[in-house]
Amino acid sequence: MALLQARGLAFAHAGRPVFAGLDLEVGTREIVCLVGPSGSGKSTLLQVLAGLVPPQAGEVRLAGEPVRAGGGGTGVVFQAPTLLPWLTVAENVAFGLRFGSTAAGSRAERQRRVAGVLSQVGLAADAQRYPGALSGGMAQRVALARALVREPELIFLDEPFSALDALTREAMQDLLLALATEHRSAVLMVTHDLDEALRIADRIVLLKGSPARLTGGWCPPGRAPRVHRSAGLNALRETLLHALGAAEAPLQSAA
């Protein structure tokens, strides 16, 4: 059975259908990248799947149970780190333990988990710093640690690395892969960067149309992180661009 199962999802905004009749599954420890034209509803779909916004039709289940906001089993990382400026790095990470089933545990256990994930993202020495003193890459590592401290089965990410420079973005992709493996977590990530999707995904799915639907799925060859510009990846990249359609392809390229 798939870890995440979405069936018959529909959502409309101001009377305009965003997506309809949408089905999606994410397997245990699978890394899925969601791509599509700007305005196709990718971020809205991610919020529905994460339980942050209720669908107007259909249902979403995680390990057989309905997904709910703040519930255990999931973590969310947004495009902006959304750190609380009056809290230290460690306190921002611990904030992720305040919700749902992850709120349980002694103070010592919470401190242990915070220290553990900060070490994993390379910020153990920065635990007492404040967000204003962090670089963009460091701030996103804090946001990733805040999601991981919940020990999620599935991590949702909404274009988390789009504001970073190319070298930092690639380093963060590698870190995400390593941490997902270490925590045995599945990943569903929205991205506008086709090369990012080709580099890290086990499967790429395309959201397109009005109302939007998932119109295709592809599995990149080889093991992530993949080498850019291999023949197989180049061929798949052209296939994806064709699937998007020339008039609907404002996707960024790291080429």
Image (spheres, rainbow, N blue to C red):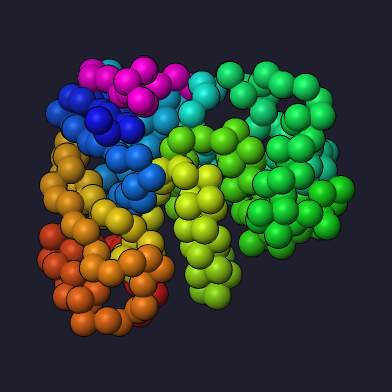
How far from the left and from the top, in percent, is residue 106? 78, 22
**In terms of depth relative to the viewer, which is nearer, 20 or 120?**
120
- Please report the bounds of the magenta region as a residue range: 57-69
Could you tell me which residue is drawn at 82 percent across and 29 percent down? Answer: 108
Rendering quarter of residue 99: top right
Could you tell me which residue is drawn at 70 percent across and 59 percent down? Answer: 122
State the quadrant of the N terminus. top left
Could you tell me which residue is drawn at 20 percent across and 76 percent down? Answer: 232
Q: Is residue 26 visible to the viewer in this orientation of the structure?
A: yes
How far from the left and from the top, in percent, is residue 168? 58, 70
Q: Main secondary structure of the magenta part?
A: strand
Residue 64 is covered by the magenta coloring: yes
Left or right of 83? Residue 150 is left
Rendering quarter of residue 3: top left
Height in image: 159 above or below 193?
above
Left or right of 118? Residue 177 is left
Rendering quarter of residue 200: bottom left
Could you tell me which residue is drawn at 62 percent across and 24 percent down? Answer: 102
How far from the left and from the top, in percent, is residue 183? 53, 45
How far from the left and from the top, in percent, is residue 214? 18, 43
Left or right of 23? Residue 54 is right
